[in-house]
Amino acid sequence: MVPGWQQWDGRIVNGRFPLRQYLGGSEHSAVYLTEIEGARAAIKLIPADAPNAQAQAASWRLAGQLSHPNLARILEAGLWHADDQQDMQFAIIEYCEESLAGVLRQRPLTPAETREMLVPALDALKYLHAQGILHGQIRPSNILAIADQLKLSTDGVRRNDEADHSTVAGPYDPPEKTAGTVSLSGDMWSLGITVVEALTTHLPARDKNGNPELPEKLPPPFDAIAKGCLTPDRESRLSITAIGNLLDRPVIEAVAEVKVVAEPKETSSSSDGRTVPAYGSASAAARSSSRDKSAKGSAHAGKWPFVLAAVALFVVLAIAVGVRLVRNTSELHNRLRRGVRRAMAQPLHPPQRVPARAPPNPVLRLLFAEP
């Protein structure tokens, strides 16, 4: 732990990277604003003797080899001899202006914004998983924005076959983390937690067994996505492709299909004691149709006197309304003629020019728009 991170303002790392402004951190790390080749960047510092320093340095080296438009780039990493008492591992990271966590402190995302957030995030995860790389830290604070482009942080990426010596599970970690199990499906669990938080601004509640309880009013298809991601059995969780398919389907179609699947099937007993669908017997359907037609015929015969009385009443009302409408229309025409004469008797004024309005600026960032 390094006390007083904020007091390092103004120092220069390896003679190249000035510590311009303290952006945040923890007891074991700090993030500063710096510059590289005249452009803004972030620099993260951790003590070289910290327990996780070597693993973090390996993660930075791995991230430096990645290239995807929706992944924050690690521009450089190395060792800094800060003073006689302390060496520092550091990484120069592409500077991101804001994060999803900052937005959720003010408001939830709309369903449209959630979809816009998920599409590039899934594309980045697909790229990582295809190379056997685990993101390991999907959460709102690591979903970032640079101008109008969404990016995932790469601060904690690692190979899927690398052991995880930490068994302390955070609120976004999958349940198998407590057993030291690491797998790509853990990213899907974390994504499910993030979807719930994005739409509600809070983490899902937990039941007595520690399993997340989904809110009742998550809009489709995000209810199905969250449920499929937050399955304790990691082998049964939704894949990236399955989530993409749910996002591509129209919402109305998804709702209709859920209703059809959920609707219980009516059944009846056959003569030999078997249970069969009610619509499976053609003769029963024919008999039912015959009875319905007979009943409808009797009902129609008793309704004719009422129908004739209603038609007569409607004709009388229509005649009365028509007479009143003709009178009102004549009076309206007279008033209009008088108004036109008065207007023509008055001098004309030159028309005033109305300045054209500038076209509205395009909305460049749907996800991180101000509320």
Image: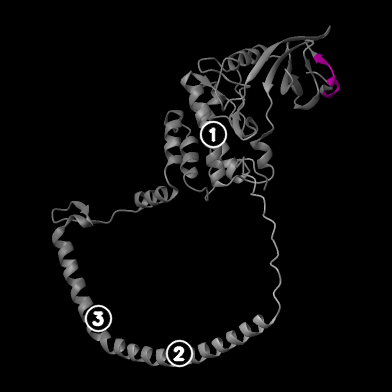
Q: Nearer the viewer, residue 293 or 245?
A: 245
**Label 2 belongs to which residue?**
321
Q: Nearer the viewer, mark 1 or mark 2?
A: 2
For the residues bearing labels 3 and 2, Cβ distance under 8 angstroms: no
Is residue 28 placed above or below 336 in the rendered structure?
above
- Does residue 204 show up? no
Q: Earlier in the sequence, mark 1 or mark 2?
A: 1
Which region shows up in magenta? 6-12
Distance between mark 1 and mark 3 Cα atoms: 59 Å
**Label 1 belongs to which residue?**
191
Task: Give the crowd class for mark 1: few <14, some 14-19, many >=20 residues within 10 Å.
Answer: many
Q: Percent x, y for residue 220?
A: 47, 47
Amino acid type shown at disc 2: Val
Amino acid type shown at disc 3: Ala
Task: Give the crowd class for mark 2: few <14, some 14-19, many >=20 residues within 10 Å.
Answer: few
**Label 3 belongs to which residue?**
299
Q: Is residue 10 left or right of residue 172?
A: right
